[in-house]
Amino acid sequence: MTFDVQLIGAHNAPLIGVAPLMRRAFAGEDLAPVGQVLLERAQAYPNDAHAYMDFSTVLQLTGNREDALAVQAEAIMLQPHYTIPARRDGGLTLLVLMGPGDLMSNTPVEFLVENSDVTLELLYLRADEDFPDDVPGHDVMLVAVAESEANQVLLKRLTEYTSEWPRPVINRPEQIRSLSRDGVCAALRGVQGVEMPVSVRTGLGALNAIASGALPIETLLPDGGFPIIVRPLGSHAGTNLQKIDTPAALGTYLKEVEGPQFYVSRFVDYRSEDKLFRKYRVALIEGKPFICHYAISQNWMIHYLNAGMTESADKRAEEAAAMASFDADFAQRHHAALQAIDQRMGLPYLGIDCAEMPNGDLLIFEVDNAMIVHAMDPEQMFPYKLPAMQKVFGAFRELLERSRA
């Protein structure tokens, strides 16, 4: 289904929002005509914040991140508050505290309540500006700001801002601050049944010393040596993430990848007996796990979109089986580990990317409050996914209801 160009071109048209735009991009629709209409509308009506915000989203979805963030900044200056009305009556209103940034900078809450009875009041806050004394009326508040080096100052300010909030708060900012890679590693240290390599934040000096042979890798990583995983601080979605096998290869990497600081950890070979890698994305809602996707790949760095799931009926059949048996199988096997993660992280809603080790331990790649979970996959190819995702959305809706009570 395409957009009504005449409607989205109208002055002060309602905000389209991230979910409808991403849904169309995901389905392969060309968003360039939509972007052109939004651009022309913003030029014709310079105070139309909705046009700026939606145009920013289109720019992000079409790979123009730098321009997108500039346009988003203009939108937030015009209007920090945006409303996405409920699709059904009789629900509640959720105030969502957001920070500026790309689509991975905040909990993608629109997907969790899409087509529901929840009204979203999105309020963008900046670390270098005063926070408002008056906010939109709401039943429950969610802190959506994701952990990142750029967001640490904002999260610190939000800790004080929300400390005595008169309404229930989901995902306290002081807990979100601990979701850095090294923070999660430290928080989960010693949990039985959990494997998470030590993740160290380090600078170019130490890495260059290791690359030259002047410093052994073991002085940086107490739990092992090469091969290692290296990524720049603040990178996401596998950007400049590489497996490095030797000091010489590390030297080559450092010449090619810019960054004053990096995360380094030992590489863990988590292949199954058939030599394939398998990764789960799990939503943990009030301590209960829900499967969101299950990807199978020949490559250790798995992203669902590059795992070949659409090209392989066998992979989809295995994912369908994993989803069908998840509650009785995976969730039971790792019940104690998942409960410990819930208790140590202290967040009612979070996402976990993980795998199973050959010895049965749960290998944790990442714990985050901003992982995208969605129901955008075509039903004819993935008929098993919508029921699984409806469980996630239902559990999130119940979380909102219980929080309001």
Image (cartoon, helix red, strand yellow):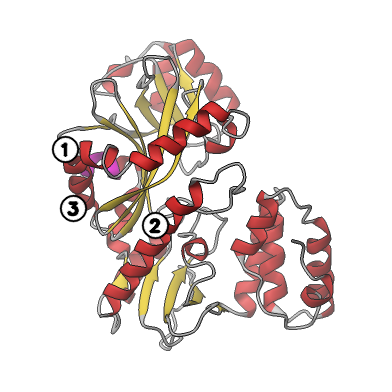
Dot 1: what SS? loop
Q: Are marks 2 and 3 in contact (CB under 8 Å)?
A: no
Badge 2: how crowded within 10 Å, few (<14), some, or many (20+)?
some
Contact (CB < 8 A) between labels 1 and 3? no
Q: How many numbered discs sit on the rendered protein?
A: 3
Q: Is residue 71 magenta?
A: no
Which residue is under mark 2? 391
Q: Amino acid at mark 3?
A: Gln
Distance from the alpha carbon under mark 1 to that under mark 3: 11 Å
The kind of secondary structure element at disc 3 is helix
Q: Which of labels 2 and 3 is toward the front?
A: 2
Is residue 185 covered in magenta? yes
Q: Position of residue 236 (x, y in %)?
A: 50, 42
**Position in image of residue 57 (x %, y %):** 66, 61
Q: Secondary structure at mark 2?
A: helix
Q: Which residue is mark 3?
A: 343
Nearest to N terminus: mark 1 or mark 2: 1
Tell me where the magenta segment starts and ends, as one range. 183-187
**Which is more foreground, mark 1 or mark 2?**
2
Along the line of sight, which residue is nearer the eye, 39 or 350?
Answer: 350
Q: Using a 10 Å C-alpha cutoff, classify the residue at mark 3 as few (fewer than 14 neighbours), some (14 to 19) or many (20 or more).
A: few
Q: Amino acid at mark 1?
A: Val
In the image, residue 316 lies at what x, y percent? 52, 34
Mark carried by residue 66 = none
Residue 204 in sight from this viewpoint: no
Name the residue beneath numbered marker 1. 191
Residue 388 horizontal/vertical position (percent): 43, 51
Distance in Å between CA atoms under marks 2 and 3: 22 Å
Q: Is residue 279 left or right of residue 41?
A: left
For the C terminus, the image quarter is bottom left
Quadrant in the picture for residue 202 = top left
